[in-house]
Image: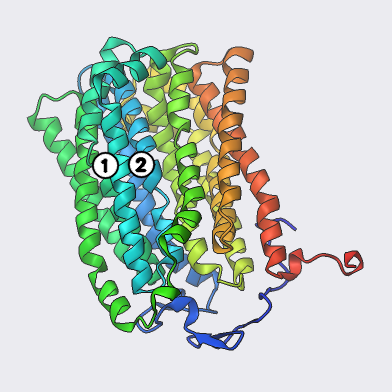
Amino acid sequence: MGLLSPPRGVGVRPGAIAAAPGGPIDRGGCTERVGDLTLRGLPPSARPLKRTQLSIFLFWVPLAATWVMMASEGPFLTAIIARLGDPTYNLAAFGVAFAFGILVEGPVIMLMSASTALAKNWIAFLRLRRFTWVLNAIATALLGILLVPAVFRLVMETMLALPDEVTHLVYGGLVLLLPWPAAIGYRRFVQGVLIRAGRTRLVAYGTVLRVATMVAAALALYHFSDLPGAWVGTAALSSGVLVEAFAARLMVLPTLRRLESESEATAADAPDYVEIARFYYPLALTSMIGLTIQPMLTFFMGRAPSPIESLAVFPVVNALSFLFRSLGLSFQEAAIALIGDDYEHVDTVGRFALYLGLASSGALALVAFTPLADLWFVQVSGLTPELAAMAIVPTMLLVPMPGISVWLSYQRGILVTGRRTKPITVATAIEVGMIAVLFVLGAWGFGWIGVTAAFFAFVGARTAANLFLRGRARSTLRRAGHPDFAEPADALP
């Protein structure tokens, strides 16, 4: 039975006895609150042993709204840039700058998953917060190193072979993105605490402020400045994440006061810094490896047929697909929070993941294979008819990706719950390697233009990573004693 198919039963780890909703769990004679969380004030969807399709939906939908709002930033900003001067060069520069902005946030991108899983008490929160500030400093330093002129020329001119018209636009865009990694890191850490407390709506409210600030900044710069389009886009992005980080800080204060007042934990009850690093290192390495994908595709597209056109179309197509992929990406933290420490809800969560994957890929197909594609790329995104025509086939290739993203998040949720983060890193490394192989096959084997080869490689490689994780997730459930994945009786010694 597949991981997204409804299992036949529910498994509980030996020694873990499920109690009534809101009650304690007995773990070998030690009684504790479920997940070390107080249950007063939590919405029904966040309480233990209450997992229906509706309750999962209600828990997840604010997170999905958050990701969809963030995904809307790309289409909005590329539409603004396309309507300013030199749109082809500025779209290409914005795509490159954003790719490197995403790359340098690699050390902090998994902080939401880490705080969702580990911030069980006040002491654990304090240690994770100090850990977060160290990672934020590292991420900001990485971007600063890239901006050193000698390093910048080596990367952009020598390695990526970008034309001069694009290179100077990329540099200014990266300068404007300097606040980006630290703001993202702190925001994701705090939002993980909110998710663990069941306060997912506050996460969505913060994103509303982020998007509103980004839109206001972009429109103000569009109407009242002479900045190039690439700089307008990156300045608007930085403005939004700074406001969201500040809002997240204010929103989490009541949760932190309750966590501090109700925590009975001692230093021994919280992971120390070595344990945090051991847990987080594979996750950080995963994100850093994964975030090399877009710069790597940029490198390949710069050397494939139609390089400038591919670089201009890539961020537009990627932004559209991200709108639908975001539904799956938002599911990872929900899966971690809802599967249960003993995987007692993995069947119900898996069923929801199946429905979500089919719906999200189906929605993208409605755009890719209908006249809505021309409407989106020409009327909404502002591409010229020639560039819009180049975007159609890559969009069709991306139709399976939203469902694949849901599958990935579900399997990662199983592994993170079981504290098995290393297979996630290995899967991401497999994905990166497969992208290189499949891009070469598409661009120079089949003769496709760069953007088509890029998304062909992306879909194929992500599928390979998921297939690798499938076996690891099944073995994790088998170790946990889940009946659907137990060894057959006649196979036991």
Please indicate whether residue 491 sits to the left or right of residue 248 in the image. Answer: right
Query: Residue 50: where, in percent of width, then height?
Result: 52, 78
* Towards the viewer: 267 or 450: 267
* Towards the viewer: 486 or 266: 266
* Towards the viewer: 270 or 430: 270
Q: In which quarter of the image is residue 462?
A: top right
Amino acid bearing label 2: Glu
Amino acid bearing label 1: Trp
Decide: marks 2, 1 in contact (CB < 8 A)?
A: yes
Return the disc, 2 or 1, that comes first in the chain's sequence.
Answer: 2
Q: At numbered mark 2, what does the secondary structure look like: helix, strand or loop?
A: loop
Q: Which labelled disc corresponds to residue 180? A: 1
Please indicate whether residue 341 sits to the left or right of residue 174 in the image. Answer: right
Q: In which quarter of the image is residue 7?
A: bottom right
Q: Quadrant of residue 79?
A: top left
* Residue neighbourhood size for the residue with mark 1, other residues' Cα within 10 Å, grouped as few (<14), some (14–19), many (≥20): many
Q: At numbered mark 1, what does the secondary structure look like: helix, strand or loop?
A: helix
Instruction: Report, in whole angstroms, how far the alpha carbon at label 2 lies from the one at label 1.
Output: 8 Å
Judging by the rendered image, the residue that carries numbered circle 2 is 105
- For this orientation, the residue located farthest to the left is 224
Query: Residue 102: where, in percent of width, then height?
Result: 36, 37
Q: Which colour scheme is used?
A: rainbow
Instruction: Name the quarter where the N terminus is drawn.
Output: bottom right
- Residue at horizontal 40%, vertical 23%? 313
* Residue neighbourhood size for the residue with mark 2, other residues' Cα within 10 Å, grouped as few (<14), some (14–19), many (≥20): many
- Residue at horizontal 31%, vertical 66%? 126
Query: Residue 240: where, in percent of width, then height?
Result: 22, 46
55 in relation to 336, above or below: below
Query: Residue 111: where, in percent of width, then height?
Result: 39, 54
